[in-house]
Amino acid sequence: MDLSLSTETIGDRTIVRVGGEIDVYTAPKLREQLVELVNDGSFHLVVDMEGVDFLDSTGLGVLVGGLKRVRAHEGSLRLVCNQERILKIFRITGLTKVFPIHTSVEEAVAATD
Amino acid sequence: MATVELRFSALPEHVRTARLVAAAVARRAGVDEAVLDEVRLAVGEACTRAVGLHQNGGITAPVKVVLTEEEKQFSIEVGDEAPRHAPGDRAPGAAGDEQDAETEEDEMGLAVISGLVDDVEVTAGEHGGSIRMTWPTTPSVTVLP
């Protein structure tokens, strides 16, 4: 399955809904999307990963890159994920300490700290 | 002889194929369903790393994946043909940042593999390297009527 991407704005937050597989082949598309959003002035991103079937280290690298970009503008990058198999990858790489991970888009949008 | 052997051009779009084949063969070999996600991810990481090494080194040879079913275990070996040089070979300052970024991604992939798989062997030499990962299998029990 390929990667699907869609965006939506709620207040000052931009929701990026990701579906399908994020791997070495598809990750560049996600990178382009995040770069484009930041270049257009969206600095508070919520990446909704509920539709993601597969995530590898290339995908993690893109998310870390996105975080670095928004932080340069005092922005934020939050993740929404409830899938154990995806969460596991964040845990084994120690990235649960780097990304705020929420259980719903509503919760991520409401979060301020 | 390997149960299944796969060779693919070092292109990112083929890594998914390698993941699917590896997961299918692992399932048949009796690797626990709960572990198949890990097999898929680990093979993907190993192949991604090999593709990166071939592309960065301008190597046209294919990446090789060998899937072997044994009596109580299933192993996957992902081989590349990228020669490794001793650290410090590179001229100081040459392609510094780019090289660092590549190394970081490479290390992230290896970190995921070692976090997922208990039995991993990474080798590298002047003719290339390989990552060999092994999982235990549960032999299928035939129930008699």
Image (tube, helix red, strand yellow):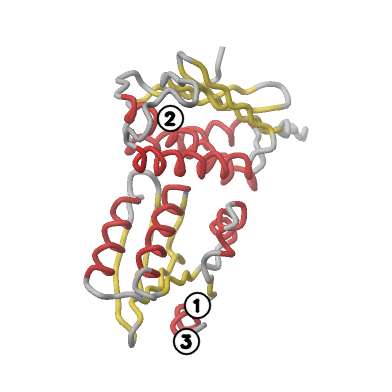
Report helix, strand or loop for mark 1: loop
Circle 3 SS class = helix
- What residue sits 71% from the left and 22% below the top? B71
Q: Nearer the viewer, mark 2 or mark 1?
A: 2
Q: Residue at x 50, y 77 (%)?
A: A104
Mark 2 crowdedness (10 Å alpha carbons): few <14, some 14-19, many ≥20: many
Contact, mark 2 vs mark 1 (Cβ under 8 Å): no
Residue A110, disc = 3
Residue depicted at 32% across the width and 57% down the height: A30
| Neighbourhood count class around disc 3 (C-alpha, 10 Å): few under 14, some 14–19, many 20 upward | few
Q: Are marks 2 and 3 on the same chain?
A: no
Label 2, label 1: how many angstroms apart (C-alpha)? 36 Å
CA distance separating discs 2 and 3: 42 Å
Tell me the residue that label 1 is attached to: A104
- The answer to whether A21 is drawn above or below residue B97 in the figure is below
Q: Chain of mark 2?
A: B
Q: Which residue is mark 2?
A: B50
Q: Residue furthest left?
A: A40
Chain letter, disc 1 residue: A
Residue type of the residue flagged with mark 2? Ala
Query: Residue A107's spot in the image, x, y percent?
Result: 50, 82
Q: Amino acid at mark 3?
A: Ala
Report x, y in % for residue A19.
38, 61
